[in-house]
Amino acid sequence: MYNDRIFLTPQEILEKEFKYDARGYRPQEVDKFLDMVIRDYTEFAAIIKKQEKEIKDITDDNVKLKQELRRLKTTIEAAEDGEGQLRTSNNVDLLRRISQLEKVVYGNNE
């Protein structure tokens, strides 16, 4: 993905040999090479900055999703607890009604 924007590999930098001039290396050749190195470092810095932003965004999304998950679990647990209490109260009401019906049907006036 980024290979088309990066000019030099670490191996190319390591193996780079400059031609000698009367006073040492040829300045134009060294400057051109250093310009390529600077371009690559600039590109790497941009890539790192972009990826750090993506990591931050993903981490923020992850935190929000975890909070939403906790909230939903709490809602489900509360609904299940309420449903259990509702069933219990419904069962008690049903038993009372059955008891009253039995009294009426069988004539037990206890």
Image (spheres, helix red, strand yellow):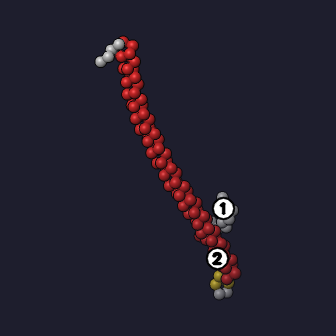
What is the secondary structure assignment of the residue under circle 1? loop
Query: From what the image shows, is residue 73 above or below residue 64?
Result: above
Q: How many numbered marks appear? A: 2
| Residue 78 falls left or right of residue 26 | left
The image quarter in which residue 78 lies: top left
Q: In this rendering, which labeled residue sits more in front, label 2 or label 1?
A: 1
Whole-percent x, y for residue 52 in the image: 56, 63
Query: From what the image shows, is residue 105 above or below residue 89?
Result: above
On the rendered image, what quadrant is the C terminus found in?
top left
Query: From what the image shows, is residue 32 above or below residue 7?
Result: below
- Determine the residue positioned at 41% across, 25% down: 94
**Residue 25 versus residue 39: which sits nearer the camera?**
39
| Residue 10 falls left or right of residue 103 | right
**Residue 29 versus residue 4: which sits nearer the camera?**
4
Residue highlighted by disc 1: 3
**Residue 18 versus residue 110: which sits nearer the camera?**
110
Whether residue 15 is visible, yes or no, is no
Q: Mark 2 and mark 1 in contact? Answer it, CB < 8 Å.
A: no
**Crowding near pointer 2: few (<14 within 10 Å), some, many (20+)?**
few
Which of the labelled discs sits on residue 34, or is there none?
2
- Determine the residue positioned at 65% across, 72% down: 39
Amino acid type of the residue that numbered disc 2 sits on in the rendered structure: Leu
| Residue 96 falls left or right of residue 36 | left
Whole-percent x, y for residue 13 in the image: 61, 70
What is the secondary structure assignment of the residue under circle 2? helix
| Residue 26 falls left or right of residue 93 | right
Amino acid type of the residue that numbered disc 1 sits on in the rendered structure: Asn
Whole-percent x, y for residue 56 in the image: 54, 61
**Crowding near pointer 1: few (<14 within 10 Å), some, many (20+)?**
few
**Residue 56 versus residue 48: which sits nearer the camera?**
56
Whether residue 14 is visible, yes or no, is yes
Q: Earlier in the sequence, mark 2 or mark 1?
A: 1
